[in-house]
Every structure is written in structure tokens, then in C-alpha cells.
Image: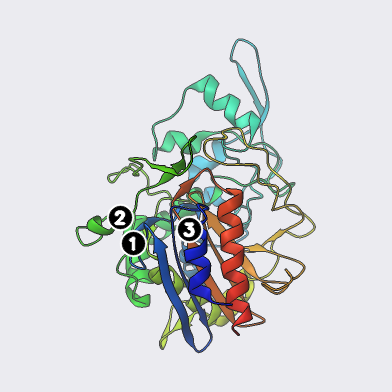
Amino acid sequence: MDIAQTLKDAVVAGDVPGAAAAAATADGKIFEGAAGDLAVDSVIWIASMTKAITGAAAMQMVERGKLSLDAPAADIVPEIATKEVLVGIEADGTVRTRPARRPITLRHLLTHTSGMGYDTWNADIARYVQTKGVPKPASREVLATPLLFDPGEHWEYSISIDWAGLMVEAASGMRLDRVLKENLFGPLGMPDTGFRIGPAMRPRKASVHVRAKEGGFTATDHELNQEPEVFMGGGALYSTVGDYLRFLQMILGNGALDGVQVLKPETVALMSLNSMGDVSCRPLKTQLPNRSTDMDFVDGMKWGLTFMINPTAFPGRRSAGSLAWGGLANSYYWIDPLRKVTGVWATQLLPFYDARAVAAFEEFERAVYAGL
């Protein structure tokens, strides 16, 4: 199966406006290519693929003794202690809450078991936002939503990793953009990754598209605030598939790439294991269909320290125990520790989990495994 052909086929079929992808084994890169309106060095909004990077930075702080996985997060970011569990919203807009039964920890944040949510997929958070008014993007107001349940009780995809980013800032004494550059992007050789679109990146920035009713795609002027109040560690990075592959190769290499060790092997091993106990992921129904479809693909999955883990193998694709996730504009990655292979595939298309885009990504993944 020709890996490059899967990208071309997806574009010709009208499944995606463009696709860029890269893959590697433990021995190094085995593929990099693109088709349609994307090039291999196109700068893309990787959205929630940011989460794994912020998680890695948090685990560096754990290694250094500056953060703890199981101590109250409020020891580091006191304002998180003000979050209470949502009881209800009255007809007059009165929000009723109660104190949480236990404190939120970094482990809760990294596994999305903190009790937080997203208005994109949770009806209660969506109603809360409508009641209180839509907050300014990339502001602390975005992070002020109430809890949906007591920490550790359930899984709910959430703004938790944005809070983990604030913990990294507090522990390091630096803004998150600088932490990531000094501790990950610089050492790993990822010059095209950052919250801000630098001058060298600007000419290569790809447009985010939506499907046109008459067929084809319409480009939007989507771009995140370049001078945000808060650097959102849960979804605000821009990158290239080549840069992101280097991060994935580091995880595949037990924390090292090209002789540079940024995480201890035992830390990567811990990040790769189920860290939510008996809790399992559950489907989420979209509240904003222009932003995402239903997240039913997570049902029964487990969560490591910022990675989704599939308990069973996907035939012709990744092994059981592989790590994966994606980004809102239909970018996806996986890391297979058993077969020692990793890959990243991206388009720039909303809403998330577009069926045709997902099928194209899965075809790419099958082609990578067929060539091993």
C-alpha cells in the first residue's frame, strides 16, 4: 500500500482540502508527504495535540520535584480551589454549586477526571456559558467554569490541560511559551512550533476550512489570538507535521531523540499507562455542531497522563496499549510502543471528527503498518 497515495486519494475524492503526514519507527523517519493545499512544512493549528506537549512539560516539573501528581493542585494554583460542583442553573440564571468532596490534583487534570468540561460537548457547561456570557478567548474567564462532578469520579474531556499549563507556569516561574521552547522545542529541534506564528512561519500558515454546501471547501480566516492573556496549554499551539513527529519520536524513544534526553524513561512509561483506575471514557454529544461532531469514538478508552489509550488492538492498525489523540481541525497522531511506530496526519477542516477526514487518516495509518 502506497502511503503517499493515500494522501492524494483523499484530496482527489474531496474528502479533505489537503493532507500532510509523517511517520517514524524506532530507527527514524519512514515517511513525510503532503497533498492538496498542504505542504510538508505547512504551519497548522494543532489544537488539542497541544495537550500531550503540555503534559510532557508538566511531567518534567514532576521529575524536578516542582510538581506532584497527587498533591492538591491548589498548592500551586490557589484559584483552582474556588471551583465547585455545579448543582443546577435556575430559570432566572442563578447558578447553584456545592463544594467538591476532594481537591483536584495534577493527575486529575492530565487524565480529564478533574470534573471540568468543555462547552463544545457538555450541555451543562454550554448552558453555563450562555447564562454567564461567552468569555473572551484565551482569558482566565474561559477557565472559570464550574465542575460537573467530584474530582476522580468520572472522565469528561475538558479544559483541565489548560490548568495543567498554569501549574507549569507557577512551578517554573516562566510563561508557558518560554517553558516549552526551552525544555522541549529547542532541545528536540522543533523550530516551527509555538503559540505565536513567527515571521518564518507566517508565509506557510495553512487556512482552516469548512465544507461548502455545494461541495468542495471554503477557507476561513481562523487564527488564534497572538497576544493571549493565557497561553492555553490545552489547544493553542501551531506546528508542522515534521516538528510534531519529532515530539512523537521522543515519546517512542522513551524520552530521548537524537541523543537528547528530555524525559526519563520511567516517566514516559508512567505517562503511557492507564492513570484513571476503573474509570473509563464515555461518549460525548456535541453541543456546537459547527465545531465538532459527537465524540463517540472514545467509548471504553482509558487515559494515561495526557494520552488516550486503546485497551484492544485496531486490526491492521495500532496495537493494544497505543497512545493517541488529535486536534479540533482534524489532525491526529498515534504512538505504538509495541510495534515501535508512530505517525501524525493532519488536515485543516472543521468540525472535529469529520467522518471523511477520519477515514483518510485511518487509511494512512493502515498504509504505514502495511509497509512495516
In the image, taking residue 307 as reference, residue 66 lies left or right, namely: left
Residue 336 in percent (x, y) is at 62, 75
Identify residue type, mark 3.
Val
Identify residue type, mark 2.
Lys
Given this view, does label 3 or label 1 mark the residue nearer the observer? 3
Residue occupied by mark 2:
205
Mark 2 near mark 1, Cβ–Cβ under 8 Å?
A: yes
Q: Earlier in the sequence, mark 3 or mark 1?
A: 3
Q: Quadrant of residue 100?
A: top right
Q: At numbered mark 3, what does the secondary structure look like: helix, strand or loop?
A: helix
In the rendered image, the quadrant that contains the N terminus is: bottom right
Q: Earlier in the sequence, mark 2 or mark 3?
A: 3
Q: At numbered mark 1, what does the secondary structure look like: helix, strand or loop?
A: loop
**Observer-nearest residue: 332 or 75?**
332
Q: Earlier in the sequence, mark 2 or mark 1?
A: 1
Residue at (58%, 72%) from the top-left corner?
Answer: 335
Q: At numbered mark 2, what does the secondary structure look like: helix, strand or loop?
A: loop
In the image, taking residue 358 as reference, residue 245 lies left or right, namely: left
Q: Residue furthest left?
A: 199
Residue occupied by mark 1:
42
Residue 275 in percent (x, y) is at 69, 63
State how far apart marks 2 and 3 are (Cα).
22 Å
Identify residue type, mark 1.
Ser
Residue occupied by mark 3:
12
Q: Is residue 296 above or below residue 358?
A: above
In the image, taking residue 71 as reference, residue 255 lies left or right, namely: left
